[in-house]
Image (spheres, grey):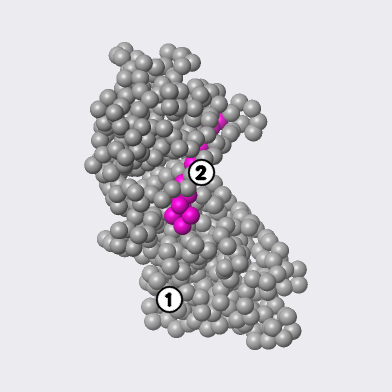
Amino acid sequence: MSVVSMIFIFFLFLLNNVNSLSIKFRRFHPQLDGISFQGDAYSSNGVLQLTKNQLDAPIGGSVGRASYDEAVHFWDAKTGEVTDFITEFSFVVKALNNSSLFGDGFSFFFAPIDSKIPKNSSGGFLGLFSPEYAFEPSKNEIVAVEFDTYSNAWDPIFPHIGVNLNSIRSLGYVQLESDFKKGSVGHALISYNSDSKFFTVSVTYDNIPNFTSEISYIIDLRKFLPEWVRIGFSGATESLSFEFSTFQPNSNSIIFQGDAFTSNGVLQLTKNQLDSPIDHSVGRASYKERIHLWSSKTGKLADFTTKFSFTVKSVNSSVLLGDGFAFFIAPFESYIPHNSTGGLLGLFSPETALDISKNNIVAVEFDTYSNAWDPVLPHVGVDVNSINSIGYVEVAARHINKGFTAKASISYYSTIKLLEVLVTVPDQKPPYSVTYKLAYVIDLRFLPEWVRIGFSGATGQLVETNNISSWSFRSSL
């Protein structure tokens, strides 16, 4: 979770306009005239705070805007003349509690003068777009430069500076320098030349001399914005997030069942000792807190994304593996069923594994052995109340039996009820990685309002080791 602060200077020039305008703020005081606040934004200690910034209170799901309180004449409807402008500001993005997980970022925006924070626009929507219309340019009227600190499903895979035109998906972007995570002071300059229609963003940092991040994009801003606009900043954080870059034996954030344990900084889901039998092993590792999946009061479902890296390894150089592991969502009181080793993956009992009326679980399985109910090849599958996957993608054997570390991303988009799975594995051939994709439309409200999330793994007569080396999770509720 991060807090976004705008500090030091906000400096705006508008040139070649009927009414030229110059604005300058060196510090931001609580009673300062000229700034309008929405949501959680406020001023403190001479800076603008766009989101909540209190260590003794929840700061998740925070969203705020701070904007100039007068309309800015951006272009002339009579003459078609568009203003040139330049704006400069300094900023700090800072994590709380020394967390390495940031989210979500802030933006400088141009919007209609009556623009307000959309509903449910926290997290990756940055207080700019509603989830319903975030990807529909025809439904929006906003231009923004985003400083995005977390990679959502629609984002590049790295923190970035992006130019957004009526959509949360950036049309152009450049990587955000990693030193921003250290609370470095950044200095942004955004300019527009109406003749060339060049929209340019450049960012420098105090602690990185002779370094500039820059992006340029050709835009006719008259096509996207009204004659009179509001200018300002918008920022947001996500409601729930956690991240484990490593797993410590004494961590109290993970609940273990069965044979699961931690060793050498990773989660081991099944037995992993060459000097003792490791067949017919089963284990679970789950987050200790319950997760709010949907609201019984409003019916609103959470949007969520979980990412993890994992390794499946054979034992004694065997080419035969068994049986796999899964990421699961289940009732909070869920435990490992009896006799659920092997192909049941610690998720289902043999008696009810194929009876959807007797189960209450959703899982994404990474299945390395073909049982009677499985496809003929190893696969990634979506399981809904049954061990029989309702959707799957087959995986080449060479991608799972070599002990490679793979990366998985599982996202749920509540507005379209879409569960999306992406799995990227190294490959020995160019481009040296392969991504498997799987999507399934499902309304998750058949699950309890509050759920447990975690991993489950099992071996049968065939064995393997299933290790999770990192894990992050973010949700909008």
Q: How far apart are marks 2 and 1 (CA)?
A: 40 Å
Q: Is residue 84 magenta?
A: no
Residue 304, compared with residue 165, is above or below; it is: above
Of mark 2 and mark 1, the one earlier in the sequence is 1
Q: Where is residue 364 in the image (x, y as percent from the top left)?
A: 42, 37
The image shows residue 19, relative to residue 148, as above or below, that is below
Name which residue lies at 58% across and 34% down.
434
Question: Between 195 and 166, which is closer to the camera in this rendering?
Answer: 166
Q: Which of 424 and 302 is in front in this view?
A: 302
**Amino acid identity at mark 1:** Phe
Query: Which residue is drawn at the image coordinates 28% and 44% (left, top)?
Result: 331
Quadrant holding the N terminus:
bottom left
**Residue drawn where x is 26% and y is 44% of the image:** 332
Can residue 312 be seen here? The reply is no
Secondary-structure class at tag 1: strand
The residue that disc 1 covers is 37
Q: What stretch is highlighted in magenta?
A: 411-426
Residue 428 shows up from this direction? yes
Q: How crowded is mark 1: few (under 14 residues within 10 Å), some or many (20 or more)?
A: some
Residue type at the position of mark 2: Ala
- Which residue lies under the disc numbered 2? 439
Q: Nearer the viewer, mark 2 or mark 1?
A: 2
